[in-house]
Amino acid sequence: MTPLKTLGLSLIAAAAIASAAHAQEALGDLTLSFPGLKSTSGKLMIGVYDGAAGWAASKPVRVAVVPAADATAKIVALPPGTYGVKVFQDVDGDGKLARDNYGYPTEPFGFSRDAPITMGPPSFDDAAFAVKAGANTQVIHLK
């Protein structure tokens, strides 16, 4: 291969790397913190939703599972947009939110923006927040 062809390929590779780096910069990282957990046992089961339809159907676009003892989670490379988070602390380790006979959760749970609960989970709009390129944070207090 001639030096000019090699240089041309190197320039194309460099441009591709720069383009990928720029695309990565355009994404947002979301750090979630869960202060005041009553217990550090079990795992935090986290769902990130990008719209009302997915929220209502419990179909997250991202999921994360972290030890409750960490009390934080990081969701990386989210496209900028509007999101909502549902989380529960799986204390008993069965992977499901435990409920009493009336359907009320018996394990700690919460929503982004600490959205209020009235006769059921909050709407997506009540929990929605913007994710922009770069660092983003949400603090969620589990009930």
Image (cartoon, grey):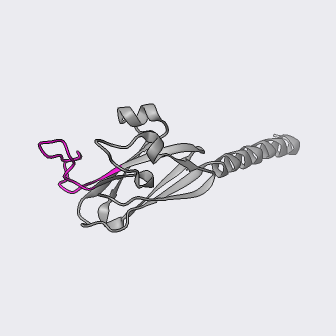
Above or below, comparing residue 38 to residue 123 in the picture: below
Residue 59 seen from this side: no
Q: Residue at x 28, y 42 (%)?
A: 119
Camera-side residue: 61 or 24? Answer: 61
Left or right of 37 on screen, residue 53:
right
Q: Quadrant of the N terminus?
A: top right
Residue at coordinates 57% horizontally, 49% vertically from top-left? 131
Q: Which of 88 and 119 is in front in this view?
A: 119
Q: Is residue 39 above or below residue 99?
A: below
Residue at the left extreme of this rendering: 101
Displayed quadrant of residue 143: bottom left
- The image position of residue 94, as x and y in percent, is 19, 48
- Can residue 57 be seen from the camera position used here? yes
Residue 120 spot, x, y in % from top left: 29, 41
Give percent across and percent down for residue 105: 21, 48
Look at the magenta stretch and give its main secondary structure: loop
31 magenta-colored:
no
| Magenta stretch in the rendered image | 87-108
Magenta-span inclusion, residue 96: yes
